[in-house]
Image (spheres, helix red, strand yellow):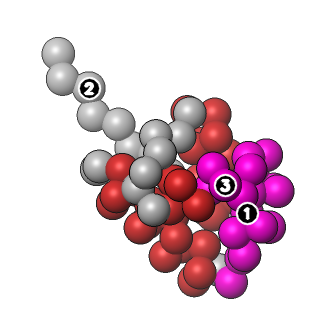
């Protein structure tokens, strides 16, 4: 998943849950500016921030590691 797809997924889920960017940013412990950049696909969120966002939105992060 690239940055744009990640941002779209976060935005769609946030809107589905009727959570504002301001509220999600506040609950997740990040700035609104950072959240806007993530949703636009312009930023790579730090892992802690991404985990917090996903927890609030009820999303999971799946990783595939090739050996």
Q: Position of residue 4 (x, y in %)?
A: 34, 58
Say left or right for 58 vs 5: right
As displayed, is residue 58 above or below residue 47?
below
Distance CA(mark 3)–CA(mark 2): 31 Å
Classed neighbour count for the residue bearing mark 3: other residues with Cα under 10 Å, few (<14), some (14–19), many (≥20): few
Q: Secondary structure at mark 1?
A: helix
The residue carrying mark 3 is: 33
Quarter of the figure with the C terminus: top left
The residue carrying mark 2 is: 65
Q: Secondary structure at mark 2?
A: loop
Task: Compare marks 3 and 2 and give the one earlier in the sequence.
Answer: 3
Looking at the rendered image, the disc whose residue lies closer to the viewer, 3 or 1, is 3
Distance CA(mark 3)–CA(mark 1): 12 Å
**Which contiguous range is marked in magenta?**
18-35
Classed neighbour count for the residue bearing mark 1: other residues with Cα under 10 Å, few (<14), some (14–19), many (≥20): some
Mark drawn on residue 63: none
């Amino acid at each position: 998943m690239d940055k744009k797809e990640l941002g779209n997924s976060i935005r769609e889920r946030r809107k589905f849950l009727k959570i504002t960017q301001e509220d999600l940013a506040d609950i997740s412990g990040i700035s609104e500016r950072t959240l806007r950049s993530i949703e636009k696909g312009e930023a790579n969120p730090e892992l802690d921030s991404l985990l917090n966002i996903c927890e609030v939105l009820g999303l999971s992060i799946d990783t595939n590691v090739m050996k």
